[in-house]
Image: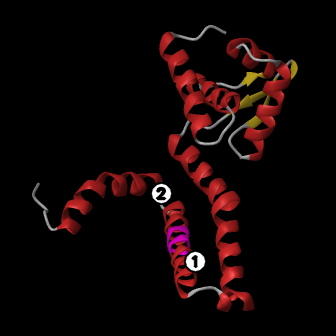
Amino acid sequence: MELSQIQRQFVLHWGEMGSRWGVNRTVAQIHALLFVHGQPLNAEELSETLGVARSNVSNSLKELQAWGLVHTTHVLGDRRDFFGTSVDVWELFRTIVRERKEREFDPTIRMLSTLVKSPEFEHETADAQDRIRSTLDLMQKLGSWADEMLRLSPGTLDKILGLGASVQRFVRGNPKS
């Protein structure tokens, strides 16, 4: 499959950003290709288009499926699996936030809660206790906020994001600038 220059730049950049976010470059490129193409592709098409090994594509697809970002579909008369992703950017955003929260954020909150509840915690210095408690408090607030945001419709989320700068100016006491 031949990519346009715009599609090629999108896929390459998404791969670079993926590695900065802690995601394997090929995983990010495959997801970007499926997203920008907008139609399911089979593993051979992905491998040929991106110029990566078929085994790398298979492993990357498994990771994307584990994240809930890629689904398998079938084409009548073709025995191969085809892979697609949502083309709704809000749905993808929500999936990524939900998965990252479950995999990274929630375990940290559980660990901090366990530390604070442990009998040994009282033997820590007051400063260390305060830092751990304040970290837990912040993480719990952010977790609750993320849960609330995930319950909102994409339209409402879009409005909230649009209000961001206005709210900041209001909070700073400078509503007109």
Secondary structure type for disc 1: helix
- The magenta segment is 138-143
In-image side of 170 versus 20 (left or right): left
User: Which sits in the foreground, 156 or 177?
Assistant: 177
Please say which color scheme the image uses: secondary structure
Q: Is residue 108 magenta?
A: no
Tell me residue 28's x, y (percent): 64, 32
User: Which sits in the foreground, 171 or 30?
Assistant: 171
> Can I make out residue 114 in this image?
yes
Q: Which residue is mark 2?
A: 153
Does the residue at mark 1 contact the one at mark 2 (Cβ under 8 Å)? no
Q: Quadrant of the N terminus?
A: top right
**Image quarter of residue 17:** top right
Q: Is residue 150 above or below residue 70?
A: below
Q: Is residue 85 above or below residue 154?
A: above
Tell me which numbered mark, 1 or 2, is placed earlier along the sequence.
1
Q: Is residue 94 above or below residue 173?
A: above
Secondary structure type for disc 2: loop
Residue at figure coordinates x 58%, y 77% from the top left: 132
User: Which sits in the foreground, 117 or 95?
Assistant: 117
Q: Amino acid at mark 2?
A: Ser
> Can I make out residue 118 in this image?
no
Residue at figure coordinates x 74%, y 12% from the top left: 48
Q: Which residue is mark 1?
A: 132
Tell me residue 29's x, y (percent): 64, 27
